[in-house]
Image (cartoon, rainbow, N blue to C red):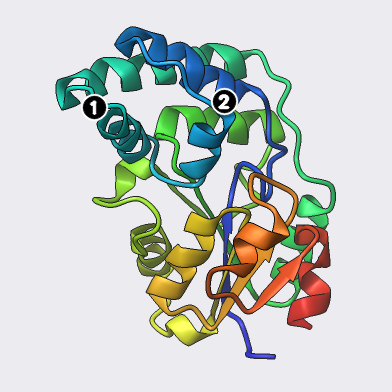
Amino acid sequence: MTKVDLVVFDMIGTTVEASPRVPEAFKAAYEVADIALSAEDISSIRGKSKREAILELLERNDKAIDLAEPVYNAFRSYLVDCYRDGPVNAISGADDTFSWCHDHDIQVALTTGFDREVANLLIAHLGWDDVVDVIVCNDDVNRGRPAPDLIMAAMERLQKIDVSRVASVGDTVSDLEAGANAGTGINVGVLSGAHKRQQLSSVPHTALIDSVAELPALLA
């Protein structure tokens, strides 16, 4: 297996347990635009930048793009209210995997399609402020997944220059596409979140594993 200096993990569904809050937030936000979202609508945009996902769903439903900002604000407000009081739970084995990475001189980055305020709420609940080396959020980059910007920003902040020595780990098609677009040496899909094996198998990947708990065995 390729020697790895950095693992870039997605958050929700990969290192943080998925919650009904996210689909509920999308559904509540789209009431602003008089759109009733289906489960398939929401599944199709999981892993993407939330701003870009909202715009994509508006365009699919032939709604004016000037609704994007009020819908996004409603989504963000709903999610902040939900997450402020918790609970927020780590995926089983995530903490042990982070510890294993650090024990083997591998840095840990978290990336998310959420903005900084929501990400900070999650990190505070989990007590991960001193556990991860960098967190890159949707509002830190110009383009969300499947563009490689989140991964490249994590590399830049941690001064990593060899993308072949980076592993990308996520639970959605967009996560795997971002890893492929970045050219990471290892591109891993986990089956603990939004998308199932059949969906993840359809895009470039190095391995599919049940959860991040299995990552150390893969990288060892």
Question: Residue 69, located in which quarter of the rendered image?
Answer: top left
What residue is shown with label 1? Answer: 62
x then y, percent, for residue 124:
62, 30
* Residue 42 seen: yes
The residue closer to the viewer here, 4 or 56, is 56
Dot 2 amino acid type: Pro
User: Mark 1: which secondary structure?
Assistant: loop
- Say whether residue 75 is left or right of residue 209: left
- Say whether residue 133 is left or right of residue 212: left
Above or below residue 67? Residue 161 is: below
Dot 1 amino acid type: Asp
The N terminus lies in which quarter of the figure? bottom right
User: Mark 2: which secondary structure?
Assistant: helix
Residue under the point 57% across and 18% down: 24
x then y, percent, for residue 63:
23, 22
Label 1 crowd (10 A; few <14 / some 14-19 / many >=20): few
x then y, percent, for residue 201:
63, 68
> Of tags 1 and 2, which is closer to the observer?
1
The residue closer to the viewer here, 116 or 75, is 75
